[in-house]
Amino acid sequence: LIKTWEPTLQNYPMIGIRDDEFATAKKLITKEEVRAVTLGKLQLQDDLVLWDIGAGSGSVSIEAGNLMPNGRIYAVEKNPQYLSFLRENLKKFSARNVLITESFAPEGLEDMPDPDRVFIGGSGGMLEEIIEAVDKRLKPDGFIVLNAVTLDTLTKAVEFLEDHGYTVEVTCVNIAKTRTLTEYKMFAAHNPVYVITAWKGEE
Amino acid sequence: LIKTWEPTLQNYPMIGIRDDEFATAKKLITKEEVRAVTLGKLQLQDDLVLWDIGAGSGSVSIEAGNLMPNGRIYAVEKNPQYLSFLRENLKKFSARNVLITESFAPEGLEDMPDPDRVFIGGSGGMLEEIIEAVDKRLKPDGFIVLNAVTLDTLTKAVEFLEDHGYTVEVTCVNIAKTRTLTEYKMFAAHNPVYVITAWKGEE
Amino acid sequence: LIKTWEPTLQNYPMIGIRDDEFATAKKLITKEEVRAVTLGKLQLQDDLVLWDIGAGSGSVSIEAGNLMPNGRIYAVEKNPQYLSFLRENLKKFSARNVLITESFAPEGLEDMPDPDRVFIGGSGGMLEEIIEAVDKRLKPDGFIVLNAVTLDTLTKAVEFLEDHGYTVEVTCVNIAKTRTLTEYKMFAAHNPVYVITAWKGEE
Amino acid sequence: LIKTWEPTLQNYPMIGIRDDEFATAKKLITKEEVRAVTLGKLQLQDDLVLWDIGAGSGSVSIEAGNLMPNGRIYAVEKNPQYLSFLRENLKKFSARNVLITESFAPEGLEDMPDPDRVFIGGSGGMLEEIIEAVDKRLKPDGFIVLNAVTLDTLTKAVEFLEDHGYTVEVTCVNIAKTRTLTEYKMFAAHNPVYVITAWKGEE
């Protein structure tokens, strides 16, 4: 069954929504450029199941939803402030295929359907447990994408993923943007993000 | 009139198609990470008109087509070898809303409908003429996105765009990826790309 | 006449002095990694004359002085606050071969001996006039090194230098460092700096 | 005993020697910009003892020697081809205070005096053994600097160093340079290098 396409975003793009359009805390959001790279790495198709673990304010879930009109996105989040941002953003962007799992992962994952794709944007100190739980449920040919901003997470994620038999590719994204507010266009750097892609078997 | 959504890509993602899936010459393609950032900057919506000037092997046009099922993409290219890659890729990825304008821009632009978005991936030494031609046709609230890999193009593009009254934001994208072919995961850098976004009026 | 080498820095290194060792305003200093690259590009030898235009708090002058025990460094600065930092740092690091020219460049340059090397760390809106003045005085086989943090300075510097017959190489330096203060080592990016090297004639 | 300073490099700079001045294999050399950052991190003073483990073609040893006229640099290398480059370069640059230890580290370290600084540019698969051997000999207040180009070395080095009680700071250096050979100045990226600095005790 294929649903009829009904565009729900009248003023917003499919991807590339400006960061300041989201209700969020400044450090919480996956910034627009890294979000675009992340969505590319997720290789989304129309009707997949995506788990967004540590969904935060929901920017990845919302744009993933635009890319998968017949797909389902499960946004897993427990922090009350983030949940409030998440709900506000889902409403603003009419994200009808994003479902909230109010839970501290890996708790709550057992009630969600098996995923084709898993994005881990935050792990709350439970990275190993999350990877273990995800590994049991990820469909064959599925991917895991994980964004790390600390050396510790980068190191542990690669270790845990390889220990579970995944092949890992790490993409370091460095972005610098001109600030147009002043007379001069100064280049301001964003902190680097390591986008880790992992899949079972060989490349 | 809104067409019914019919997914045509069965094995390929909406965005994030791997570079090696495209028929192309190695240096010609907009690599997958920069392509994702570029598509984000274009802020595509379902039914827009996009001009892809210097379309090369068509990777941007094809993924833009996936993001705009009711939109039209005009891929402008003159180089015979690139045209051959472009045609092969449009067929492979069933890109039914990408139309080829076989022309050396700014020639040929006059026959295309006014654009909501313009992507300039290559200018063949005609950058100023292209920006002038685009400026006469770009719809209000439209954007121009231009990718520069040389200091010369970066400098000239910003100068020409500002001379024509555009506000300009420059995003420098630096990507480094691990190569998984060897026992060790070595970080290999891609050359930086300056993604220039330009719009009329203030930010 | 070659002076006997008398080490004056007992606790400080020749180069690589930590940023927080200098009296400075946070945004004023050339950070240690970019300072090291800059000093490398200056290709200093024991007894050269270096002009440091827009010397700020003097970190480049001081380390250049360590690299040229028989050289002379002219630190050109006019801002009273920066001069105060500069004097404090010259004293702290016993920089006996750094001479202050209290002047707003290009003023004051006429009283200094012809330079083998010129570093332009700040131009106070007088970039073209400074390059013109420097060009009249730079010794054959001399170099100019200029650090740009804005697109505007990058663009203008390259244009002015090429107009005066210089060959230009631009090195973009992107640094990200782990912050060790917290339990986790987070990568924090410095804003990119464009280190421009310019010399007369071909490469 | 302080020796009189006798400059031995007439045509070469103290630091910043161009990469193509060294006899080397292309991938072997620590490129000039990363070399400058590395030397800064080593915080060299006039009369220290430096171990350069995996010295390769000797570019770090040679410039370190210029920074420490009364110091001693022990260049540890075993590969016959590299040794040939190393000897040629020491001669060309009159590096009188660089001593070759022809050995596969950690072998050979026992015969060298205790180091104030240790640079590990290559470990030949013996990283843990080298760090262990260095740790027993490094003087109090000494530093270790290690350059990693693979994720594996980055991960292991940080782990081993922290296991031995070191505080670690990681500096990721991304360099892109314009190529001046063509009509256009294209930005070409160098692969990123992770410069790891490690010292005993807190920051």
Image: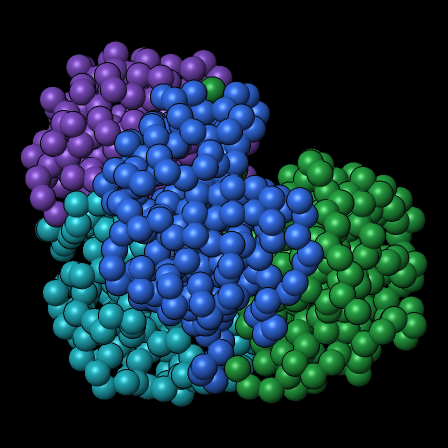
Chain colours: A cyan, B purple, C blue, D green
Task: From the viewer's side, name the closer residue of A136 and C105.
Answer: C105
Which quadrant is home to the N terminus of chain D?
A: bottom right
Residue at the image position 44 percent from the left and 63 percent from the top: C90
Residue at the image position 17 percent from the left and 45 percent from the top: A183
> Looking at the image, is C126 positioned above or below residue D86?
above
Total of numbered circles in the picture?
0
> Looking at the image, is B163 positioned above or below residue D155?
above
Q: Is residue D201 visible?
A: yes
Residue A21, quarter of picture: bottom left
Return the x and y of residue B51 as percentages of the image width and height: 24, 28
> Looking at the image, is B161 positioned above or below residue D7?
above
Return the x and y of residue D105 as percentages of the image width and height: 86, 67
Return the x and y of residue B83 as percentages of the image width and height: 42, 19
Residue at the image position 35 percent from the left and 56 percent from the top: C56
From the viewer's perspective, is C39 left or right of D146?
left
Residue at the image position 61 percent from the left and 73 percent from the top: C10
Return the x and y of residue C64 as percentages of the image width and height: 53, 52
Task: From the viewer's side, name the closer residue of B57 and D176.
Answer: D176
